[in-house]
Amino acid sequence: MLQGFNYPLTPQGKSTLNPPPPWYYSADFLNIEFWSHPSAVAALLPTGLDPDPSANGHGNALFYDWQFSGENEEYLDPARYQYREFFILVDALYEGKPVSYCPYILWTTMRQWLAAGLRAIRSVSARCSRPGITPRQERQAPPSHRDRSLLAP
């Protein structure tokens, strides 16, 4: 009998893309709040969502540096269980109630791409400074803590 929480299912259930819950996540992230032209936001919204006139084109661009772990010490396999993510959220209305809609989301690893069926990207990073950190300490910090940008294929 085939076993596993997610595909591919195998006789021993160890080839699955994700182990069974519970899942634990930790992250470093950068949230960039922005305002765009309201008509640009309206053009992104699918049927059923309406522009929020009070938001005036408000949105967020988010960069995440994720670490995932389940019950099997997945944090010991960073190539498979660490990834970076970039996504955009824009304000909208659903049946008159405020919601956030995500028109774009991208990941750096194939694992997330396969799990969600979306496209992976080559690189996600951005430059951010932290209070109390000297420029020398900033340069010596691991790249995941200092550089953030987006590079799509």
Image: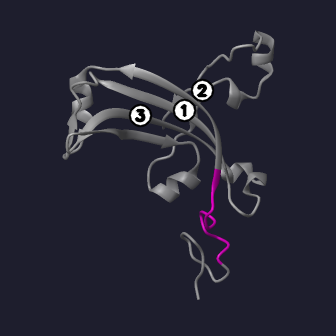
Judged left or right of residue 146, residue 50 is: left
Query: Outermost residue, top direction?
Result: 135
Q: Quadrant of residue 97?
A: top left
Please state the horizontal and vertical placement of residue 77, each as a whole percent of the image.
Answer: 75, 53
Please state the horizontal and vertical placement of residue 123, each as a whole percent of the image.
Answer: 58, 35
Q: Which residue is mark 3?
A: 88
Query: Does 20 sit above or below residue 98?
Result: below
- State the mark number for residue 148: 2
Of residue 96 and residue 137, the one placed in the foreground of this image is 96
Q: Element at badge 1?
A: strand
Marked residue nearer the N-terminal end (3 or 1): 1
Marked residue nearer the N-terminal end (2 or 3): 3
> Are the residues tagged 1 and 2 within 8 Å (C-beta)?
yes
Dominant SS in magenta = loop
Magenta region: which residues?
Answer: 13-24
Instruction: Report the Cα–Cα distance between label 1 and label 2.
Output: 7 Å
Query: Does 20 sit above or below residue 64?
Result: below
- Residue shown at 58% from the left, 55% from the top: 111
Q: Element at badge 3?
A: strand
Neighbours of disc 3 within 10 Å: few (<14), some (14-19), many (20+): some
Neighbours of disc 1 within 10 Å: few (<14), some (14-19), many (20+): many
Please state the horizontal and vertical placement of residue 37, each as a whole percent of the image.
Answer: 26, 20
